[in-house]
């Protein structure tokens, strides 16, 4: 049976991280450039792409369920698996009679076998050049801009270096051109992303960078690191915010902390995965730092950033009151953590609880450990029972709720800039602060447009969100 489809429509389902979301946007852009049309209903699409995540067993199990359901909805559909599971032999074997194509990350030219039209000669030379493909952005106000792909860290539990390969970085000029184009189109939030953004390094002729970046700074550096890239992004004219994710603690340098503090467009939010709060667990995870190292880093971030942030962010005239420097709000610190890693004792877990209590994270993404095939940790005993992992997750969640509420209460009565993102199910206007706090706006006495930056007085603090009123 031919692979060609009479129905040249596609639908993409994305599971996982920000990189997967960005990859899906580039896949959509590539398909539409080559004659495919998007279908909002997957049951009517000729081609359904599952962009998969292999970081957790739960994400993998979701793929198995989706493939079966999609085939029941439309037996004639062509199913493509890409993302972290695309090159897993055991997954391919399990789904061999239901998946039509296993697409390694970024190898988009393979799509041509499904097209009834003739694909032109493709410029993608290898699996990493796809980052230069013009994406179809899902949002009109916020965009993920990938600066590279892959990872060199080889944390014991992580599949990313095997699924995506070693670190490969985009040219700085190409990244800056993408950001500049987004700003011209009115985007208000740009997030630079990679598996480890702060290990970025690119070497090119400095004159090329000076031209591409339109920056005197670019002309003085041949080796461009992440600090240089962040400065050049901040130098792009326009009214927009800059975020970045994800950072590895071992690469969060003093130079980067200083760059974040001095960048007026760089948001007051650092996502810094800790993964565990015990030195022995961190050693088995191959994380490359100790709990003491992490706490010292947090101290440096808060000392420098809380002092440095300009009055542009939170010093505002309200009811004839000017909030002075002592009223400035602290940087938001978020993290990732794994509970129940191989061999994690109750005492070691309690060390993680103590770290949460000391650091007082604004948000944490807590995951129950599940062994991933091919990783170093897969050879260790998964000896923490499922129910115990669930209990430990709940313990950390309870601590997080208390610390997040404590942090959010510092916003009460303050005025913060909020990016309006839309409306919730109740029809209430919602948005986010520069510190990544979700804000629900009540008593709306003026019309707020999606993508608008507005000044909001915070009237109520909750554990994972704020309530505010737009200032007249």
Image (tube, rainbow, N blue to C red):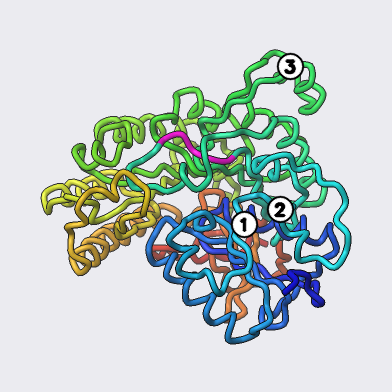
Q: Position of residue 106 (x, y in %)?
A: 65, 49
Name which of mark 3 and mark 2 comes first in the sequence.
Answer: 2
> Is 433 left or right of 391, judged from the image as shown?
right
Q: Nearer the viewer, mark 3 or mark 2?
A: 2
Q: Nearer the viewer, residue 280 or 47?
A: 47
Q: Measuring 63% from the left and 43% from the top, which residue is drawn there?
A: 146
Disc 1 on helix, strand or loop?
A: loop
**Could you say whether the residue bearing mark 3 is in a helix, strand or loop?**
helix
Residues under numbered marks 1 and 3 in contact, where contact means CB atoms less than 8 Å apart: no
Check residue 277 for magenta coloring. no
Residue 274: image location, x then y, percent: 34, 43
Numbered label attached to residue 103: 1
Cβ–Cβ under 8 Å for marks 1 and 2: yes
Rendered position, 192 above or below 75: above
Can residue 86 be seen from the camera position used here? yes
With respect to residue 108, does 72 lie above or below? below
Q: Which residue is mark 3?
A: 206
Check the image and name the residue furthest to the front. 1
Q: Nearer the viewer, residue 95 or 252?
A: 95
Q: Quadrant of residue 242?
A: top right
- As rendered, which of 307 and 139 lies closer to the eye? 139
Image mark for residue 184: none
Q: Farthest bottom residue?
A: 73
Label 2: which residue? 108
């Amino acid at each position: 049976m031919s692979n060609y489809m009479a129905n040249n429509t596609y639908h993409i389902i994305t599971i996982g991280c920000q990189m997967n979301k960005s990859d899906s946007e580039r896949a959509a852009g590539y398909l539409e450039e080559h004659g495919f049309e998007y279908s909002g209903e997957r049951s009517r699409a000729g081609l359904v792409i599952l962009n998969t995540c292999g970081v957790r067993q739960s994400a993998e199990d979701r793929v198995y369920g989706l493939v079966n359901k999609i085939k029941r909805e439309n037996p004639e559909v062509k199913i493509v698996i890409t993302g972290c599971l695309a090159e897993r032999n055991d997954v391919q074997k399990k789904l061999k009679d239901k998946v039509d194509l296993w697409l390694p990350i970024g190898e988009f030219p393979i799509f041509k076998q499904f097209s009834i039209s003739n694909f032109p000669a493709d410029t993608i030379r290898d699996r990493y050049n796809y980052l230069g493909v013009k994406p179809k952005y899902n949002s009109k106000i916020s965009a993920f801009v990938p600066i590279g792909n892959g990872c060199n860290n080889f944390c014991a539990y992580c599949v990313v270096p095997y699924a995506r390969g070693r670190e490969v970085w985009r040219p700085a000029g190409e990244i800056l051109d993408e950001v500049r184009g987004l700003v011209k189109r009115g985007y208000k939030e740009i997030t630079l992303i990679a598996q480890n953004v702060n290990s970025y390094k690119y070497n090119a002729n400095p004159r090329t960078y000076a031209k591409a970046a339109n920056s005197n700074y670019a002309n003085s550096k041949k080796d461009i690191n992440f600090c240089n890239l962040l400065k050049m992004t901040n130098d792009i004219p326009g009214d927009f915010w800059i975020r970045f994710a994800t950072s590895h603690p071992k690469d969060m340098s003093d130079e980067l902390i200083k760059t974040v503090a001095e960048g007026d467009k760089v948001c007051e939010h650092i996502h810094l995965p800790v993964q565990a709060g015990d030195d022995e667990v961190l050693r088995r995870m191959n994380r490359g730092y100790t709990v003491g190292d992490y706490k010292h880093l947090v101290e440096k971030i808060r000392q420098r950033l809380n002092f440095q942030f300009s009055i542009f962010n939170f010093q505002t005239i309200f009811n004839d009151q000017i909030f002075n420097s002592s009223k400035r709000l602290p940087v938001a610190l978020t993290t990732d953590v794994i509970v129940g890693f191989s061999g994690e004792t109750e005492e070691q877990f309690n060390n993680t609880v103590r770290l949460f209590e000391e650091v007082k994270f604004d948000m944490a993404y807590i995951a129950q450990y599940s062994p991933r095939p091919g990783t170093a940790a897969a050879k260790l005993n998964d000896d923490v029972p499922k129910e115990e992992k669930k209990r430990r997750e709940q313990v950390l969640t309870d601590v997080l709720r208390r610390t997040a509420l404590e942090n959010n209460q510092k916003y009460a009565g303050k005025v913060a800039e909020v990016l309006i993102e839309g409306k919730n199910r109740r029809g209430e206007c919602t948005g986010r602060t520069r510190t990544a706090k979700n804000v629900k706006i009540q008593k709306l006495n003026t019309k707020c447009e999606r993508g608008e930056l507005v000044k909001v007085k915070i009237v109520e603090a909750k554990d994972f969100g704020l309530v505010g009123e737009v200032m007249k």
